[in-house]
């Protein structure tokens, strides 16, 4: 019998992140279209069971009233989905601003977390959401400014995250900080660990691990001093390094993204270059998805993980709109759950 936990979710933000109206950008894909593409996927009778959701336009107005949010919840539930983790609009140009910035910028960051908690409450009370976290990051693009004074800048991020974690706790929510090489203070496994330990509120703020992004942690892409392997590594070297990284970050991991990476970086629009997400069957993919997932999912239930999510951030629209893409992804998700779930 196949495992039934954790639940299998698809992310809605690949229809938004990196999309837009600037030169060279593709247009956003609507929430309705993303839901339909997700609902259309099926492998041996198994379908996606839920979605993870980005709380910003054009999918969602974070200032929407309760009635509008309930209509969105009805739309999602009507497709047979639960809502899991939510992405707070913490970045400049959305609601928030840099967690490393001035008092005014910090307040904007915290206001985005408050908005996310309010929306989470509406979804929870509706019944469409019964589990999941609220995702944040430092919202400071690139690491150049951080490097001017790493100690002071990390302390500022820690201060912002502590305040955000308290807001989440007051709303009965947990925050997960997604480690990516493009976010200042979160751009290496060691710097990410310093932030998590600096906040020191594991019941309210943990780590969101993404297979594509954390692969570049092992290579020290934006922090060579923290590299665990070098290009041209052997299989033995890779798995030793991977275990070393995951042993450090897994105890903090409360949200998990299944993904593939080809060892390159990629960016679009205002989103700085970060780990490149690839199709699950990309011939250039560097990761054994199922085996890598196992390192993060050890004892997943003890950390409150009830679902896993596929992240295809910045896939081209032609890839996103191809139904075969989602069947391949769902198949990879099922293999992860069968190998490491319950």
Image (cartoon, rainbow, N blue to C red):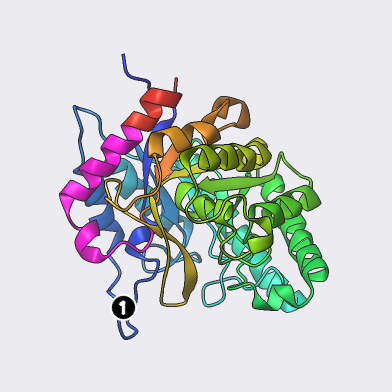
Q: Which of 121 and 155 is in front in this view?
A: 155
Q: Would residue 33 be found to the left or right of residue 241 on screen?
A: left
SS at mark 1? Answer: loop
- The residue at 64%/39% (across/down) is 244
In this figure, which residue is indicated by the disc labeled 1? 25
Where are the magenta residues, as a range? 313-334
Q: Quadrant of the N terminus?
A: top left
Q: Quadrant of the C terminus?
A: top left
- The residue at 28%/43% (across/down) is 329
Tell me where residue 146 appears, x and y as whole percent.
71, 73
Tell me where residue 340 appears, x and y as whole percent.
45, 25
Tell me where residue 113 appears, x and y as whole percent.
62, 59
Residue 44 visible within the image: yes
Secondary structure mainly formed by the magenta segment? helix
Q: Nearer the viewer, residue 342 or 94?
A: 342
Q: Which of 177 and 170 is in front in this view?
A: 177
Residue 118 visible within the image: no
Tell me where residue 167 appears, x and y as whole percent.
71, 53
Q: In this view, does 125 lie above or below 58?
A: above
- Is residue 23 covered in magenta? no
């Amino acid at each position: 019998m196949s495992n039934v936990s954790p639940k299998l979710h698809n992310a809605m933000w690949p229809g938004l992140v990196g999309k837009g109206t600037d030169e060279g950008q593709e247009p956003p894909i609507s929430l309705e279209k993303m839901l339909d593409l997700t609902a259309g996927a099926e492998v041996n009778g198994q379908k996606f069971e839920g979605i993870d959701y980005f709380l910003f336009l054009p999918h969602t107005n974070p200032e929407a009233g309760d009635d509008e949010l309930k209509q969105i919840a009805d739309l999602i539930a009507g497709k047979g989905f639960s809502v899991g983790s939510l992405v707070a609009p913490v970045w400049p140009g959305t609601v928030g601003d840099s967690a490393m910035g001035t008092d005014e910028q910090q307040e904007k960051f915290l206001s985005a977390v408050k908005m996310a908690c309010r929306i989470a409450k509406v979804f929870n009370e509706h019944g469409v959401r019964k589990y999941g976290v609220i995702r944040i990051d430092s919202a400071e693009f690139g690491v150049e400014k951080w490097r001017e004074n790493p100690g002071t800048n990390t302390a500022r991020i820690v201060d912002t995250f502590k305040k955000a974690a308290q807001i989440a706790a007051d709303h009965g929510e947990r925050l997960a900080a997604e480690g990516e090489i493009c976010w200042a203070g979160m751009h290496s496994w060691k710097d990410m660990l310093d932030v998590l330990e600096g906040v020191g509120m594991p019941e309210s703020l943990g780590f969101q691990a993404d297979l594509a992004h954390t692969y570049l942690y092992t290579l020290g892409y934006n922090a060579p001093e923290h590299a665990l392997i070098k290009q041209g590594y052997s299989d033995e070297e890779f798995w030793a390094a991977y275990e070393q990284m995951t042993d450090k970050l897994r105890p903090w991991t409360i949200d998990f993204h299944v993904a593939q990476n080809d060892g390159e970086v990629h960016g679009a629009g205002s989103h700085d270059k970060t780990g490149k997400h690839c199709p699950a069957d990309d011939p250039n993919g560097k990761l054994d998805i199922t085996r890598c997932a196992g390192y993060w999912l050890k004892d997943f239930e003890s950390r409150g993980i009830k679902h896993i999510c596929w992240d295809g951030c910045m896939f081209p629209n032609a890839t996103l709109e191809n139904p075969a893409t989602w069947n391949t992804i769902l198949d990879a998700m099922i293999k992860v759950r069968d190998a490491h779930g319950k």
